[in-house]
Amino acid sequence: MLDALTFRLSLVKRSVRAGWLFATILLRYLPVLGVRKVLGRRRTDVLLERTHRSAAVRARRGFLALEGVYVKIGQVVSMLTGFLPDAWLEELESMQDSVPPKPFDVIRPRIESELGAPLEVRFGCLDPVPVASASLGEVHLAELPDGTEVAVKVQYPGIDRIVDTDLAMVRMVLKVIALFLPGLRVERIHADLSEVIREELVYTQEGLNCEAIAANFVGDDHVRFPEVVWSHTTDRVLTQTRMGGMKITDVDAITAAGLEPRAVIEVLVRAYFKQLLVDGLYHADPHPGNFFVNALPADGSVAGNGRAEPAITFLDFGAVARFPEAFKEGMRTVVYGYMTRDDGKVVEGMVRMGFASAGGDEAVFRKAVRHYMDKLLHLDISDFSKIDISEFDVWRNLDEMRVSFRDITRAFEVPRNWFYVERTLGLLLGLCARLDPTVDAFLYGFPYAVEFVFGGDSNLAALWGRAGSPEAGPDPETVPAGETERGPGDGGASSGAESGR
């Protein structure tokens, strides 16, 4: 009884601390609203940028102090690239989901109650010191009675109650923010946020996610996955075979092992484009900590120069996304429209994907799509590390288009699937840039894009331009008759198999 009361009091205390954190952040913006007319546009923008930075730093520090779900919330909110100011993106993306571990006398009963027997019965040994501890749980290395080396992921006791409390507070904060940003869909954002976080609480689903993606790479020695030990797995305990290797961002170690960073990039990008464009099921958290790299005997299949071949191990399948068929068909049409520089097809595809809001202003929708497409077509991708992401900042582009935030939120209904895609591609690009910023990483995924849009017809690669760039434009002489007028939305493509690999 005393323990239950203590836990309830801790939840109340946590809510008070979180409420104070959000209040202090929101209060930082009130002076900006009050002096806008006095200072003028330019000086107000400078003040607003400073306020964004101080508020974002305060949020990051506060989330890390609160630990638990707020760290996860910060990471999920960082998916909103383009909708958040740069300062907020930088601070939230820098948050590492790493918190101090819980005492082992709290973790041990959790494992034993979930697995239905003492540790000594279920394991040959289990290290009480975790190798990783995050917002929802921690990981311990262990051995099964037969000597198999495993990693045991344990969910913290009471975390589901903490999730409920924290999400209730977040809903209140979103309602306050909506007072300053009319058109903000509070219930939709809260529902999506809640679903993302709650999905990660079910470890059996994470195990199934791992097996489903691994099944799509059977026979591919360059992509590896841990095996789930179902006899030692429940909704709150996940046991998998232990994996090891070099950190994917340790370029010195990768080079010392005889591997080329660009070969690692190629394996990683091909694996992701296969998941995204062929399988429709993908690992949605390409964070550096979720990959190991090992060297395979050289066979020339990837590096092509007699050097050792890279094998990449995928870890952590709590964030896995699937493409509904309508979303996939819409995305196929968007890619076709971009490759053929047909903004009408891009608009059509985005409508199919669910971007167009019912009852929204169609003219605003089309204007925004064409505006961003023009920016993409003129984007210099010779060095991904030098791409100015501020070019795609929502507030900056609203000014350029002379469209209000209210109008844009009424015209657009951003589907949850897109947040995952956007975040996944953004993290993937950043990871590749850390390995080698001079590599045009997405060119390695081009065969999958051709397969995805055109069913693997290599002749249609010319739609991307003879130089492999949209700037070159399509070559009408190399495009089969009728294809320039018929997009995937007109029945022109199938997802096919991985013949582009």
Image (tube, grey):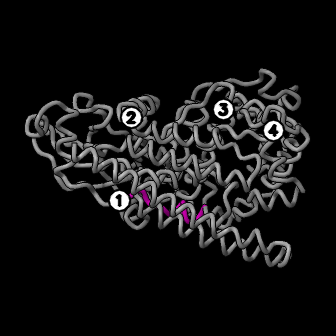
Near mark 4 (Cα within 10 A), the count class, few <14, some 14-19 or many ≥20, is: many
Dot placed on the residue nearer the N-terminal end, 1 or 3: 1
Looking at the rendering, the stretch of residues picked out in magenta corresponds to 89-99
Task: Residue type at mark 3: give it.
Answer: Glu
Task: Residue type at mark 4: give it.
Answer: Val
Q: Which residue is mark 2?
A: 202
Residue drawn at (66%, 30%) of the image: 328
Q: Position of residue 89 (x, y in %)?
A: 60, 61
For label 4, the SS is helix
Foreground disc of the pair 2, 3: 2
From the viewer's perspective, tell me whether residue 220 is left or right of residue 415.
left
Near mark 3 (Cα within 10 A), the count class, few <14, some 14-19 or many ≥20, is: many
Q: Position of residue 271 (x, y in %)?
A: 51, 41
Quarter of the image for the C terminus: give it: top right
- Check if residue 60 falls in the magenta segment: no
Mark 1–mark 3 distance (CA, rounded to whole Å): 43 Å
Task: Residue type at mark 2: give it.
Answer: Val
Dot placed on the residue nearer the N-terminal end, 3 or 4: 4
Residues marked 1 and 2 touching at CB (< 8 Å)? no
Using the image, tell me which numbered label, if any, was put on residue 346: 4
From the viewer's perspective, tell me whether residue 154 is left or right of residue 211.
left
Q: Position of residue 319 (x, y in %)?
A: 47, 41
Residue drawn at (28%, 47%) of the image: 5
Q: Which residue is mark 3?
A: 451
For label 3, the SS is helix
